[in-house]
Image (tube, rainbow, N blue to C red):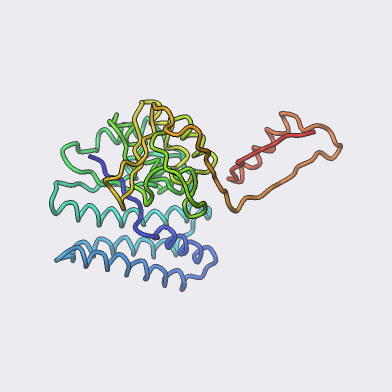
Amino acid sequence: MVVIVSAMGKMTNAFEEVVGHWSTNDLALAREKIGTIRQFHFAIIEELFDDPKDLLAEIQELIDQVQYGLEQTFLSYSEGYDYIVHHGELIATKIIAAYIGKETPTVWQDTRLLVHTDDQFRRATVRWEETARAIKSRIDQSKVNVVQGFIGASSSGKPTTLGREGSDYTGAVFAYCLDADSLTIWKDVSGMLNGDPKIFQNTTKIDRLPFNEAIELAFYGASIIHPKTIQPLKKKGIPLHIKSFINPTAEGTTIGDVDRAIPEVPNFILKKNQALLQLKTKDLAFIAEHHLSAIYQLFADQGVVVNLMRNTA
């Protein structure tokens, strides 16, 4: 069994605050936030374990690595972001592996040695052949393997991240490489809804959803799953179950080679913090294909993702 773990609570947000202070050279505030992160995890450990001395030392070592990162020079903001933020998953998996290991044979796995990526920090692309070889050779099928979601490492060994909600994608990567029977993702909602319940009232749970529609919803911003999660599962016909850790016995949603359970129910997606740009040619000529290619290349060079494009006269 493979158990993929994200950072605890709102710790990814907390580490992002550290990154924000680091990027503006407010190192005192960064260290203060790191202290808060340390206290959060230490409190959990002391509640779960009778003799946590060794585990506390391991977590302190990871906290020290974050402190060390504040003093380093990175090639870009994104590289520094990945170095700092990925410690949230490392810390969480150390705790979860130790807790499961009290009752069940468990091994902590370092995803940085398993998920090989390029060096596109904050939005890394998986190098599938190398990743598959590493996963198949290192995963211990006789034990519970606790691994970090969201993260990987470049060929130079630098930590990378796969994008927010990237733990879902990590699950799909492992399911694909191990030819898993299924993948289950645990969320704080009852399954795939036709709208974000934090924004829309009276949402409807979708019991079954075909792969193609799930890919489209994820692409357009359905935040419950990472946009890249579905494709590797579809290639091997591996069903995805989305269930609630608040109500684990509830049915949830199954995404796979199925018909949609409620075909007449529309989906609603709200994308915030979007920028609308209007581009024109100086001589009022039509924008042709080669213009679009150049425009998209400029955005790609700056790491800007274009969500929607419309070309008119």
Viewport quadrant of the N terminus:
top left
Image height check: is 208 above or below 186? above
Q: Is residue 75 above or below residue 236?
A: below
> At 22% across and 52% down in the image, what residue appears?
97
Looking at the rendering, in which quadrant would you find the C terminus? top right
Q: Position of residue 227 (x, y in %)?
A: 47, 39
| Depth order, front residue of 119/49 | 49
Name the foreground residue: 127 vs 212.
212
Foreground residue, 9 or 213?
213
Residue 91 lies left or right of residue 73; in this view the side is left
Q: Is residue 99 left or right of residue 278?
A: left
Q: How many marks?
A: 0
In percent of the image, x 20 and y 46: which residue is there?
107
Residue at 67% from the left image edge and 38% from the top image edge? 309
Which residue is more in the foreground, 80 or 170?
A: 170
Which residue in the rendered view is the most extreme toward the right?
283
- Determine whether 256 is above or below 66 in the image: above
- Can you tell which quarter of the image residue 51 is in? bottom left
Measured from the top left, where is residue 116 in percent x and y?
38, 39
Residue 246 image offset from top left, x and y in percent:
31, 53
